Image: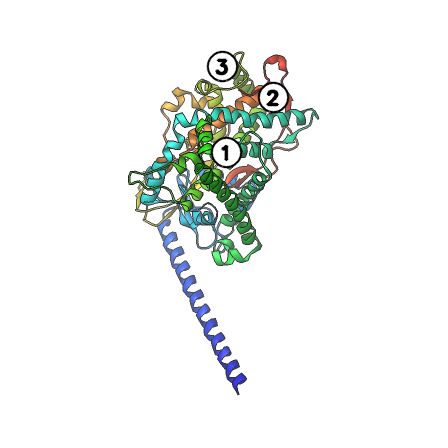
């Protein structure tokens, strides 16, 4: 009798559980449908490309050539158009300077529908924070990017670049093209490890390499999740092989950051270690974070520390790698500009064989070429916001609060209504005369407005030092059989790498690099 009653009770419990799951499922579906209706109604006055009832525009976005598709849509639909990632997630995709100004001059929060995917990895650092806490963190972090702090980093950039160029010297002896992406990525990580954690000059350890691989994995998985609507639900995603792989990579990244923070905190308790830190030729990012206090005497918690360090490592590593690789590709593709940059660098350095802080402001033509490379190949091709209040656009159309915005930087930078001959590589666009009359929101490789990239000067300094030393050491040319295939992966990468031929420039030209 008891087993029968038990089985009946379990049966009824199962029915109740199934019924509850169905009710919750229908409730969730109803909420999603209502939200889709609200988003679609908000964008009624914006025509756009044909939308698949289930996938939205996700299929076109996932295909090779999706960035060029975005540019063609921008030609077809001036100002903006709806962009659907699956059936329920809809953005107004903007790529016109006045539209960008209307949204990005205000400081609206990041779109949680996209950026919440980052939480498991980088936590609530400056990238994801909003409101008073974002302002507090921004204020605490500003001293880390003061020019007095950035100045000694130039020697760090030189050291890390030298290690990479020595590798390339050996590879170039085979007189074959090779992919530079991984080497640039390791160099950028080596630089960040020294600037963030005060790593020594011995290069990356095995643990650091594991961290590099984990970060590469995470960026790939993040882009796949954003583009695949079936992965948007957390519960479903964590059950998939992709989700479990993401969690494993997060654990590697977190373990690495946590260990470094613990080691530094322990070192600060030791007087001898404190003396060593004070005698170092530069303060690193972690030193500044650990010593940061706000006006109320509050310090960053351990959780906040990890979030800011992970955010800085993510934002400063992959973006710089992308920017440097696409710039070197442009130099190889346009040898006349490569020669002119090299000539300028030689004139600035004279008999010296390394770059110093005061040289950076003199690299006028190199800077214009870097900016033109960033225009054609922005390291971060697309960013997202959620409107905290209604916005009125210059053409009379508007969007209500709660609407989602996608700023397509790649399409903005190739907008034919903004740039003449947008597909042509022309550094002279960035002379002082040509920039004077340009819309301030026409060129925004580091985003724009109050939430722009806090580390953009750090990034520009690093790109200048690395690219100048590369051009001094090697003559670059393309591999005609393996042109790069553009692929957005949070950053703008190449699906097949960056295959270049590097010809060493002889020691007689004064091109050898040494430590200062």
Front residue of this view, candidates 268 and 214 = 268
Residue 46, image x and y in percent?
Answer: 38, 46
Residue 112, how many percent across, how many down? 40, 49
Q: Extreme left residue here? A: 296
Mark 2–mark 1 Cα distance, whole angstroms, equals: 24 Å
Vertically, is 10 above or below 39? Answer: below
Between residue 151 and residue 255, name the one nearer to us.
Answer: 255
Mark 1 Cα-neighbour bin, 10 Å: few <14, some 14–19, many ≥20: many
Residue topped by disc 2: 474
| Secondary structure of the residue carrying numbered label 1 | helix
In the structure shown, which secondary structural element does the residue marked by tag 2 occupy?
Answer: strand
Q: Which residue does the image show at 43% across and 27% down from the upper left?
A: 150
- Relative height, residue 101 to residue 117 (above, below): above
Image mark count: 3
Asked if the residue under mark 3 is in contact with the one under mark 2, i.e. CB atoms within 8 Å, the reply is no
Circles 3 and 1: CB atoms closer than 8 Å:
no
Residue drawn at x 50%, y 33% as measured from the top left: 192
Q: Which residue is mark 1?
A: 192
Foreground label between 3 and 1: 1
Q: Which mark is residue 233?
A: none
In the displayed structure, would residue 3 be above or below residue 407?
below
Is 509 left, or right, of 465 in this rendering? right
Mark 2 vs 1, N-terminal side? 1
Q: Which mark is residue 348?
A: 3
Q: Is residue 137 left or right of residue 201?
A: left
Percent of width and height locating residue 414: 46, 33
Question: Could you tell which of marks 3 and 1 lies nearer the N-terminus?
Answer: 1
């Amino acid at each position: 009798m008891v087993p029968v009653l038990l089985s009946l009770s379990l049966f009824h419990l199962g029915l109740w559980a199934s019924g509850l799951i169905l009710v919750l499922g229908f409730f969730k579906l109803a909420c999603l449908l209502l939200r889709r209706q609200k988003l679609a109604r908000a964008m009624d006055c914006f025509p756009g490309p044909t939308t698949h009832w289930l996938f939205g525009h996700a299929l076109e976005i996932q295909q090779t050539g999706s960035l060029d598709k975005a540019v063609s849509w921008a030609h077809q639909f001036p100002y903006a158009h709806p962009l659907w990632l699956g059936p329920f997630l809809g953005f107004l995709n903007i790529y016109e300077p006045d539209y960008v100004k209307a949204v990005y001059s205000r400081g609206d929060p990041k779109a949680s529908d996209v950026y919440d995917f980052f939480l498991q990895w980088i936590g609530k650092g400056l990238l994801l924070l909003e409101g008073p806490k974002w302002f507090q963190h921004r204020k605490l972090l500003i001293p880390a990017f003061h020019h007095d702090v950035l100045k000694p980093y130039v020697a760090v950039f030189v050291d890390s670049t030298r290690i990479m160029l020595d590798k390339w010297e050996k590879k170039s002896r085979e007189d074959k093209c090779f992919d530079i992406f991984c080497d640039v990525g390791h160099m950028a990580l080596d630089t960040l490890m020294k600037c963030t954690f005060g790593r020594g000059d011995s290069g990356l350890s095995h643990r650091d390499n594991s961290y590099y691989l984990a970060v590469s994995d995470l960026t790939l998985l993040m882009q796949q999740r954003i583009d695949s609507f079936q992965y948007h639900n957390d519960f479903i995603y964590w059950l998939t092989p992709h989700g479990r792989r993401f969690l494993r990579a997060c654990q590697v990244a977190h373990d690495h950051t946590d260990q470094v923070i613990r080691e530094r905190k322990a070192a600060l308790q030791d007087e001898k270690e404190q003396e060593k830190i004070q005698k170092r030729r530069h303060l690193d990012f972690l030193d500044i974070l650990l010593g940061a206090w706000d006006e109320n005497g509050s310090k960053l918690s351990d959780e906040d520390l990890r979030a800011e360090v992970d955010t800085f490592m993510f934002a400063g590593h992959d973006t710089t790698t992308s920017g440097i690789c696409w710039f070197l590709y442009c130099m190889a593709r346009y040898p006349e500009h490569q020669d002119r940059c090299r000539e300028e660098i030689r004139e600035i350095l004279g008999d010296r064989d390394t770059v110093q802080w005061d040289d950076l402001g003199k690299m006028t033509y190199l800077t214009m070429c870097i900016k033109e490379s960033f225009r054609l190949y922005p390291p971060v091709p697309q960013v997202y916001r959620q409107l905290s209040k209604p916005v009125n656009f210059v053409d009379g159309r508007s969007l209500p609060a709660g609407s989602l915005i996608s700023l397509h930087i790649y399409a903005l930078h190739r907008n034919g209504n903004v740039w003449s001959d947008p597909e042509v590589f022309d550094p002279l666009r960035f002379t002082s005369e040509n920039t004077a009359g340009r819309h301030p929101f026409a060129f925004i490789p580091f985003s724009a407005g109050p939430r722009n990239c806090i580390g953009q000067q750090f990034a520009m300094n690093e790109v200048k030092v690395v690219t100048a030393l590369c051009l001094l050491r090697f003559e670059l040319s393309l591999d005609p059989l393996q042109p790069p295939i553009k692929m957005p992966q949070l950053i703008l990468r190449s699906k097949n790498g960056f295959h270049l031929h590097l010809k060493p420039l002889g020691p007689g030209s004064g091109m050898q690099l040494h430590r200062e």
